[in-house]
Each structure stands twice: as C-alpha cells, then as structure tokens.
Image (spheres, rainbow, N blue to C red):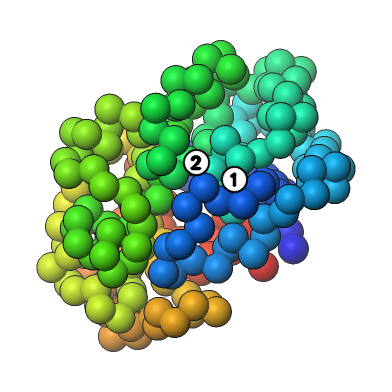
C-alpha cells in the first residue's frame, strides 16, 4: 500500500493516505475503501506518523486523505498534521469529508488556520442516482447548498446503471460552478456494482479535453494520485 506521493501535474502537492476510524456512513454501494479503516488508535497513529514524516513541504501544499472523512482521523494524527503545517510552512490543505459533517467544516478550517480546499464525494448531482442507487446519503438539493460548505466535488463515472445524460449534466456543473473538482472513473472492486466499459469509452472520448483543464483532475485509475493499491 503506497501512502505517500507527489502530484506533479495539476495543482502540484504532496499527498498522504492515512488510517482513520470507521466511516460515519460506510454504506455507499460502490465503496470498499472502508476496509482500510481501523479501531486500533495507537497502531493508526504509529502508521500515520511514519507516513507524515515523508512530507517535505516542497510545494507548500498538502492533501490528506483517509478511507472516510478527515474528522475520523485520530486526534494525535490531526495534531501531527497541524505541527507539520507550521514546521513545513504549508500554505494550503486539501481535506475530504462526508456530507454528514457539513456543520463541522468551519471547525476544521479554524483548527488548521490556513486555506483548505474541502473535497466531498458527491459522485453525481442527480439526486436519485446519488442517494438511491449509490446510497450516498448526501441529501443536498442544489449546487448552491453544497457550495455553502464544500469547495471541490469528487464525481464518479462509468458505473452500470448510470446514463450519458447524468454524466453530461455532472460535467457541465463541475466545469461551470467549481474552481476544483475530481472525476473518478469507476474500477471494479469487491462491491456488486460493475463498470460499464462502453460508458467509460464514451466518457474518455467525449471528455478527453478535461485532461487539459487545470481545474479538473481525472483519475482513470483509482491509484493515479500515487497512493492506494
């Protein structure tokens, strides 16, 4: 499992994949990332500290991810990150959170005291596809409601049951309404959902231009950021 990497192309930054407590929701139909969660706090902190020791501050930008939300990282790990922010003169953080924690976003911004790009796994702006098919439990109704709390949506494309129309609308929204977004092309995993190869081929042909859009990062494989397995 690779847990430290540098993103060298768009939005250059260091990135770490840490261990956290179980996801507050943990019921998304497409997700098996939660297998990386733990309840053994001392072991989590030991691993997380070892990973965090790799951070050099070379870009003054750091992204911290875990298999859930940043609020599920152990307190000692969060304090270690805050120390690194100060010691390495980090100017900007990327963090991620589930919609359930939306009312605590300011708390985390205040804790670190530097600009944070808060990501959220939206997967789709189609309400039914997001909450019924994908069981995301992110029940915002409008883009404006989402933007009250979060800066950067993470989208999912290429799942059987998804449509071209849904993807077209999602791509239009992230291009027009956000300064940063991530698009994850679905890769088969241990869940029952399956990749739609025809839909993926269509997406990668129609939206190939997104690879040149500085605001949007397309992950054609889920390890394209250099972390995970």
Q: Are marks 2 and 1 in contact (CB under 8 Å)?
A: yes
Q: Residue at x 59, y 60 (%)?
A: 34
Is the residue 44 above or below the residue 221 in the image? above
For this view, does 178 lie left or right of residue 87? left
**Toward which corner of the image does residue 148 lie, by quadrant?**
top left
Image location of residue 22, percent across then percent down: 62, 52
Q: Residue at x 44, y 44 (%)?
A: 98
What label does residue 96 carry, if any?
A: 2
What label does residue 123 carry, if any?
A: none
Report the label total.
2
Q: Nearer the viewer, residue 60 or 193?
A: 193
Image location of residue 135, percent across then percent down: 34, 63
Report crowding for label 2: few under 14, some 14 to 19, many 20 or more residues within 10 A (C-alpha).
Answer: many
Is the residue 158 above or below the residue 94 in the image? below
In the picture, the quarter occupied by the C terminus is bottom right
What secondary structure is found at the residue carrying circle 2? strand
Mark closest to the chain's N terminus, 2 or 1: 1
Q: Residue at x 44, y 20 (%)?
A: 106
**Which residue bears the numbered disc 1?**
65
**Toward which corner of the image does residue 180 lie, by quadrant?**
top left
For this view, does 121 lie left or right of residue 144? right
Image location of residue 112, percent across then percent down: 59, 19
Q: Nearer the viewer, residue 102 or 60?
A: 102
Instruction: Decide if residue 181 is in sight here.
Output: no
For this view, does 140 lie left or right of residue 183? left
In the picture, the quarter occupied by the N terminus is bottom right
What secondary structure is found at the residue carrying circle 1? strand
Q: Residue at x 27, y 32 (%)?
A: 147
Q: Nearer the viewer, residue 39 or 116?
A: 39
């Amino acid at each position: 499992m690779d847990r430290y990497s540098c993103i060298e192309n768009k939005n250059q930054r260091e990135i770490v994949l840490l261990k956290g407590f179980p996801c507050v929701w943990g019921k998304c139909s497409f997700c098996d990332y939660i297998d990386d969660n733990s309840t053994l706090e001392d072991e989590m902190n030991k691993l997380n500290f070892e990973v965090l020791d790799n951070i050099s501050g070379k870009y003054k930008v750091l992204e911290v991810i875990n298999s859930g939300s940043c609020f599920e990282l152990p307190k000692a790990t969060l304090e270690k990150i805050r120390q690194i922010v100060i010691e390495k003169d980090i100017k900007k953080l990327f963090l991620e959170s589930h919609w359930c924690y939306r009312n605590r976003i300011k708390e985390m911004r205040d804790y670190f005291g530097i600009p944070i790009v808060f990501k959220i796994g939206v997967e789709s702006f189609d309400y039914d596809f997001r909450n019924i098919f994908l069981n995301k439990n992110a029940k915002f109704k409008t883009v404006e409601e989402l933007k009250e709390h979060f800066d950067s949506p993470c989208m999912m494309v290429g799942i059987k049951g998804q449509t071209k129309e849904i993807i077209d609308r999602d791509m239009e929204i992230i291009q027009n309404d956000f300064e940063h977004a991530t698009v994850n092309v679905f890769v088969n995993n241990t869940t029952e959902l399956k990749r739609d190869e025809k839909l993926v081929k269509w997406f990668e042909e129609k939206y190939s231009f997104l690879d040149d859009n500085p605001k949007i990062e397309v992950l054609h494989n889920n390890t394209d950021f250099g972390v995970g397995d």
